[in-house]
Amino acid sequence: MSHVTLHGLPRSFGTLAEWVECPVGIVAQIQGHKPSAIAGNHYRRRPIDLLRLWHEKIEGWILKEAGVTAPQEPALSVALAEPPAEAREEAGQRSGE
């Protein structure tokens, strides 16, 4: 696979993302680019779960087209909200605080 280079991988990812109709701004953010438009700089707030959803959709399409079966791993879940006060108090009592 001498035609594959590290330099070309981001371009290939962006091009392949079009096949699942992923918004350009989401592709750019997944790739680590800064927002370039005023709307991207000031109005778009994309939670990590939204980026993960699109990344998994792109990844699934690429693997399907390549004939590769993706391993079925449980999705990681990140709790972003603070637990209710009762739950914090209960956890503190269990830990001996």
Image (spheres, rainbow, N blue to C red):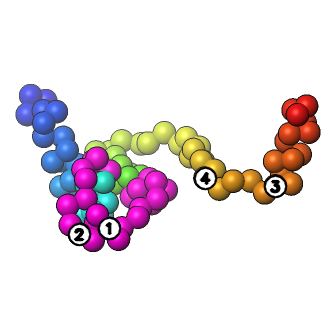
Residue 6 located left or right of residue 70: left
| SS for callout 3 | helix
Q: Residue 4: image x %, image y %?
A: 13, 34
Residue 42's disc number: 1
Residue 57 visible in the current orientation:
no
Is residue 37 one of those drawn in magenta?
Answer: yes
Q: Earlier in the sequence, mark 4 or mark 3?
A: 4
Query: For mark 3, does the 10 Å Cα neighbourhood hold few (<14), some (14 to 19), or many (20 or more) residues?
Result: few
Q: Which amino acid does label 1 sit on?
A: His
Mark 2 to mark 1: distance in Å? 6 Å
Q: Do the residues labelled 2 and 1 touch (CB within 8 Å)?
A: yes
N-terminal of the pair, mark 3 or mark 1, is 1
Q: In the image, what residue type sits under mark 3?
A: Ala
Is residue 24 among what the camera can see?
yes
Determine which residue is flagged by label 2. 38
Which numbered circle lies on residue 85? Answer: 3
Q: Earlier in the sequence, mark 3 or mark 2?
A: 2
Task: Find the magenta span and give its range.
Answer: 30-54
Amino acid, disc 4: Leu
At a point 38% along the width and 52% down the height, the residue shown is 55
Q: Mark 4 points at which residue?
A: 80
Displayed quadrant of residue 27: bottom left
Residue 43 vertical placement versus 64 (above, below): below
Among the two numbered marks 1 and 4 on one chain, the one whose residue lies closer to the N terminus: 1
Label 1 sits on a secondary structure element that is helix
The residue at the point 56 percent across, 46 percent down is 75
- CA separation in Å, label 3 and label 2: 39 Å
Q: Is residue 91 left or right of residue 82?
A: right
Residue ID at (13%, 36%): 7
Q: Indicate which label's residue lies in the foreground, 4 or 3.
A: 3
